[in-house]
Image (tube, rainbow, N blue to C red):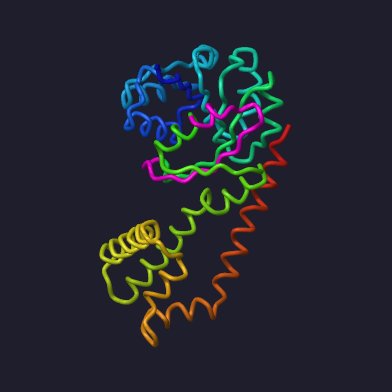
Amino acid sequence: MNQPTIAFIGAGNMASGIIGGLIQNGWPTERLIATARTEATLSAIKDQFAIETTTDNHQAVQQADIIMLCVKPQMMKAVLSDLRSSIPAVSLLISVAAGITMSSLEAWAGNDQAIVRSMPNTPSLLQCGAAGLFANTAVTPEQKALVDRVFSAIGIAEWVKEESLIDAVIAVSGSGPAYYFLFMEVMEQVGTQLGLDQETAKRLTQQTAFGAAKMAQASDVDTAELKRRVMSPNGTTEQAINTFMDGDLPALIEKAMNAAVKRSIEMAEALKD
């Protein structure tokens, strides 16, 4: 059985990350096509992946089983409205644009199109991403399985039952990498203040973050228990954790994540049809 053909409308970083992951996982290059507004962008994609490219979105979607919409949110309405007459009725649309609601995507695409709204994050560029997925009622179980195959090439993906939960996904994993980068940034700075050279502080911080994530993934206990196991009574870690708790770090994290949700809702309102 032939692999489905995937057309990427927009060939930016996220599209490149997904294309690279698919090829690494055995997706045939002849079943991938990418579009962009400039030949320069397409030349870079073609040189990197040896796939078909074109500046003609209509040509690309007419031969596609899956259409990955990788354009910027503010461009989505114009792109989809223009393509409406060319999209095959049997094609599956997958949007990776933040803030574009399913109702807007359905209105712009028309034809009762099968659509999945996705929220991948930037580690997807290294095939270790985390994405949230929401499908409209036109998406079949077979199409959902195809979406799982696509996103498993760049990390993990979780389906949500209600579209509003995409906002929670944004707060947890969409924006989440920046939370960890901030924490790492501060740890590196304090490490140098304590006498470490910059490179040593950086390497120790990065490896510690990597190791903690790997332990959490491999463990059969929750993160609260993993934290407790590092905290010897009256030890250094306990003192550090108590300081975080005295500063009400959990409440600050909750406030920050709710701010991300609030902004996601505001963006969706501003971008809707």
Query: Is residue 40 found left or right of 113 in the rendered image?
Result: left
Q: Quadrant of residue 194?
A: bottom left
**Residue 176 location in percent, x, y?**
50, 54
Number of marks drawn:
0
Q: Where is residue 220 in the image (x, y as percent from the top left)?
A: 40, 61
Q: In which quarter of the image is the N terminus?
A: top left
- Residue 201 versus residue 17: which sits nearer the camera? 17
Q: Magenta residues, as a range? A: 125-145
Is residue 207 magenta-colored?
no
Left or right: 76, with 213 as reference point: right
Relative to 98, does residue 235 appear above or below in the rendering? below
Image position of 59 with respect to 268: above or below: above
Q: Front-most of 75 and 69?
A: 69
Looking at the image, which residue sits at the far bottom? Answer: 234
Q: Where is residue 180 in the image (x, y as percent from the top left)?
A: 45, 59
Q: Residue at x 48, y 29 (%)?
A: 146
Q: Which residue is drawn at 62% across and 25% down?
A: 114
Quadrant of the image occupied by residue 136: top right
At x 27%, y 72%, the residue is: 196
Q: Which residue is drawn at 68% across and 24% down?
A: 108
Residue 138 drawn in magenta = yes
Rendered view: 141 above or below 5: below
Image coords of residue 112 (percent x, y): 68, 22
Where's the C terminus, which quadrant?
top right
